[in-house]
Amino acid sequence: MAASGAATATALAGCGGGGGGDGLSGSLTISGSSTVHPVSAAMAEEFQREHSGVDISLNKTGTGGGFSKQFCPGDSVINGASRPITEDEQQTCSENGVEPLEFQIAKDAVTVVVNPQADWVDCITVDELNQIWQPDGAQRWSDVRDDWPDEEIQLYGAASTSGTFDWFSEYVNGESGRHRSDYEATENDNRIVQGVEGDEYAMGYFGFSYYAENQDRVKALQIDDGSGCAEPSLENAKDGTYPMARPLFIYAAKNALEREPVSEFLRFYLEQSSSELVSDIGYVPSSEEQRDESLDKLESNIEDVSS
C-alpha cells in the first residue's frame, strides 16, 4: 500500500507565552525522522521548562521527507535522521544555501515485531527476513519455514521517505530502497503497532522505543546474523551484540546558529544526549566523549557564524 505523504506536526508552545522568564524568545521548526521524533519532543519539552518564550514545532516527516521538503529548502532548522544524509540531499541543501551539520545523539536497535500469539517464532535469521522483505518476497509463513503456519504474512513497515526504510532495506536486502512494495507503509509507528497487534500472522519493524512503549501489545523477535540469536535491548545495542543497532542523528542548518533560540536549544539537546532522558525514551544515550565532541563542534560553528 502506498504511504501517505502527509506530515504529522506537533507544536510545543512556550508554557508561559510571551517572552519567558529568562527573556529568550523566538521559534524554530524540527522536521524529520519518526524514530528521532520522541527524543526531539522530549528535549523540546524540557528546554521550554526554562525557556518558555521559545515556540518549537515538530513535523514527523520521515528522514528523507524532512530533508527534501523542509530542511534543505530552509523551512526547518533541525532535521532528525535515522541514517546519514545522502550525497543527493547534501547537493539539494547546498543549492539552497543550507549547510547541514551532523550530530550523533543516540543509538537505536531496529526491532522486528510479531503478534504475541505468534508462538511459532521467537528468533529469525537475517536471511529469513530477506526472504520476507525483498521484492516479490514470501507471501506465507510456510514459504520461509515448512513448519511455520500456512497463512499469509501481513506486513507493516516504514514508508519510503523514512530513514528506517533505507536502513532496513540496506541491512536486510543488501541495497537501500530494495524492499517489497506490497505492505502497509507508514510514517506513523503507532499504526504498525496497531496492525501487528490486530493480526496473529502480522510482522512489522520500527525503532526500539516504539517497542519499549508497547511490549504488552507486540512481541519482539530475536535476530540471528550467524552469531546466534540476540534480543533487541539497550544493552545489546550498546555493546554491539544485537546486529540491527544503528546510530541516530540530528542535522542543524549552520546559518541558523546565528539565532540565539536555535543555538541555545542545540546546546541543551547535545548536553542532554548522554542523559537518562534518552534511555528513558528507549535509546542508548551518547557517550560522554561523543557528547563532548558534539558540543565542541557546535561551539566552533557558533563562533564561525558569529564572527
Image: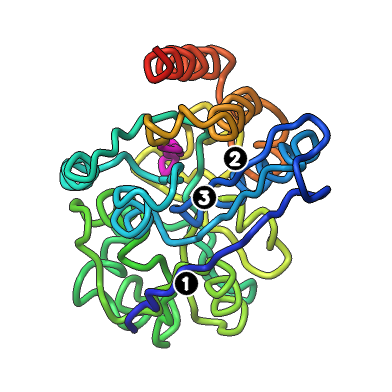
Which of the pair 3/178 is nearer the observer? 3
**Residue closest to the far bottom:** 151
In the depicted structure, whether residue 121 falls above or below residue 301 = below
Q: Which mark is residue 203?
A: 1
Q: Amino acid at mark 1?
A: Met
Q: Residues within 10 Å of mark 1 (few under 14, many from 20)?
A: many
Dot 3 or dot 2: first in sequence order is 3
Question: What amino acid is at disc 2?
Answer: Tyr
For mark 2, what is the residue? Answer: 283
**Quadrant of image for the C terminus:** top left
Query: Which tag is nearer the camera, tag 1 or tag 2?
Result: 2
Which mark identifies residue 133?
Answer: none
Q: Which mark is residue 29?
A: 3
Residues in magenta?
243-251
Mark 3: which secondary structure? Answer: strand
Secondary structure beneath label 1 = strand
- The Cα atoms of the two marked residues, 3 and 2, are separated by 23 Å
- The colour scheme used here is rainbow
Residue at 40% x, 79% y is 184
- For the N terminus, the image quarter is bottom left
Question: Mark 1 and mark 2: span between their CA atoms?
Answer: 22 Å
